[in-house]
Amino acid sequence: MKIDWNRRTCARRGHVTYQPQEPELQDRLRADTALGEAWRCLRCGDFTLGAPRGAGPAADAPLVPRGKVLRDTFILRFLAVERALRGVFIVLVALAVWKFSNSQDAVRRLFDEYLDVLRPVAGHFHYDLDHSPVVGTIQKTFGYKHSTLLIVAGLLVAYALVEIIEGVGLWRAKRWAEYLTVVATAAFLPLEIYELTEKVSWLKIATLVINIIAVLYILLSKRLFGLRGGRDAFEAERHSASLLEVRTSAGMTAAHNG
């Protein structure tokens, strides 16, 4: 079923009405009813009772996202939430690494004690803990220097901040955030591909596919790095819709303006 992004957004945020100074446009946007005056919404085109929320020249009509733009905003906000959650998770990992670096010997002793307890149980199920890849990886971390772990924690915090900044910027539909997301995501694609050559998993494949789709989508839909006419074409498309906002809602087609 096709989603009506205009009415869906109006249902959540309310209608956007505007009173242009031009009398002929006012007549097309305004209607008298038994309950009082009604004005046509610039987003969905429906009439709503009450005074308009704004007024001025038609050329100054507010830029109201509609249709495809609303869909793009929804997708960007989905990516924003994903980036923000990822950033929070990485901060928690960085905190764990930092705490581990300050109590490395105590954690090692505790791990060895639990390992001694679990070794007979694992042996009963014919699982050799001493040659387990997971156990081996954990034991290697105990050999890392305190300074090395602090550097790792710092790098994780820096990466988390980038993810959170991306999330905030994408949520607010900032163009710089779109560039940052594309560059940051694309920079890690080679690493994700390399990890797949080491060990294949559905999670890694899904993450790689999602990131590639996100990069291509933002690049093309937002006309970044000069693609599809670049920023000029992107702004012209948005401002063209803004200048025609009142006329379109008033039922005056582009052919009429041409």
Image: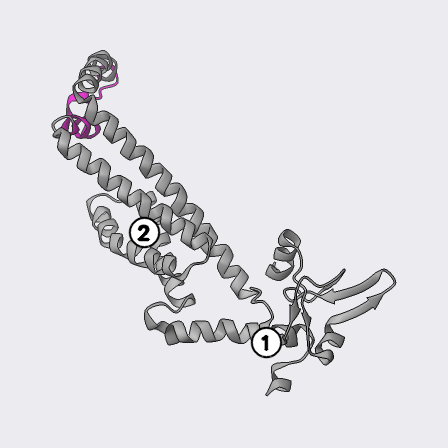
41 up-or-down from 165: above or below: below
Answer whether residue 139 is magenta in the image.
yes
> What is the magenta range?
123-141
Q: How many marks?
A: 2
User: What is the secondary structure assignment of the residue under circle 1?
Assistant: helix
Is most of the magenta stretch helix, strand or loop?
helix
User: What is the secondary structure assignment of the residue under circle 2?
Assistant: helix
**Mark 2 / mark 1, whichever is N-terminal:** 1
- Locate the N terminus and report the quarter of the image it occupies: bottom right
**Residue linked to disc 2:** 208
Which label lies toward us, 2 or 1? 1
Q: Hey, what amino acid is under mark 1?
A: Ala
146 to the left or right of 64: left
Q: Hey, what amino acid is under mark 2?
A: Leu
Q: Residue furthest right?
A: 34
- Locate the C terminus and report the quarter of the image it occupies: bottom right
Residue for point 62% across, 61% down = 6
Residue for point 14% across, 32% down = 147
Answer whether residue 193 is magenta in the image.
no
Image mark for residue 25 = none
Residue for point 35% across, 59% down = 215
229 to the left or right of 56: left
Specify the quadrant of the image occupied by residue 198: top left
143 up-or-down from 216: above or below: above
Q: Position of residue 22 (x, y in %)?
A: 69, 79
58 up-or-down from 127: above or below: below
Image mark for residue 59 = 1
Q: Position of residue 24 (x, y in %)?
A: 73, 80
- Given residues 100 and 18, the one toward you in this image is 18
